[in-house]
Image: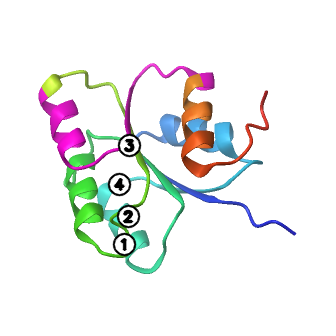
Amino acid sequence: MEQFKKILVVDDSPTSLYLLENMFQGNYLVITAASGEAAIKYLETNTPDLILLDIMMPHISGIDVLERIRKTERLKDLPVIIISAITDEIYIEKARNLGVNHYVTKPINVEELIQLVSNLLKTPNNNS
């Protein structure tokens, strides 16, 4: 039996977590983290196949989480998609400099995000 690929969804908004979890559940194993701290704690002992990461979170931002991921040998090549309402070029450029794979702005285009995830995980798009 084929094992589901794991997606870690990190967002401090319960609504965003719920929507993203439901968008990918069934095709992937979705793990949620409601803060940057929770994401870092999870990543200490687990390696998902992809991370969907919000930027604006209290205490530890998504940019800080991304920076830690890229500095960790085991995680440094992990695909990361930032999903954020922030369209400020400063944040987008910082994310790109840290090696983010894609930067998606909210409101998200569901089909586009599903395709991005599918391409990064090299899995067939089961929702088409």
Residue beneath disc 4: 35
Name the residue at 45% across, 19% down.
107
Residue beneath disc 2: 38
Determine which quarter of the picture holds residue 7. Answer: bottom right
Task: Check the image and name the residue furthest to the left.
Answer: 90
Cα gap from disc 4 to disc 3, whole angstroms: 21 Å
**Which label number is shown at residue 101?**
3
* Secondary structure under the numbered disc 1 in the rendered image: helix
State which mark lies toward you, 1 or 3: 3
Dot 4 amino acid type: Ser
Residues marked 2 and 1 touching at CB (< 8 Å): yes
Cα gap from disc 2 to disc 4, whole angstroms: 5 Å
* Residue 90 seen by the camera: yes
Cα gap from disc 1 to disc 3, whole angstroms: 22 Å
Name the residue at 32% across, 45% down.
100
Picture coordinates of residue 106, whole percent (x, y):
41, 22
Cα gap from disc 2 to disc 3, whole angstroms: 22 Å
Q: Please give left or right for residue 45 compared with residue 76 in the image.
A: right
Q: Pick whichever of labels 4 and 3 is earlier in the sequence.
A: 4
Dot 2 amino acid type: Ala
* Secondary structure under the numbered disc 4 in the rendered image: loop
Picture coordinates of residue 56, whole percent (x, y):
26, 39
Determine which quarter of the picture holds residue 117. Answer: top right
Dot 1 amino acid type: Lys
Q: Please give left or right for residue 8 compared with residue 35 in the image.
A: right
- The residue closer to the viewer here, 55 or 114, is 114
Name the residue at 28% across, 72% down.
72
Residue beneath disc 1: 41
The magenta region covers 90-111
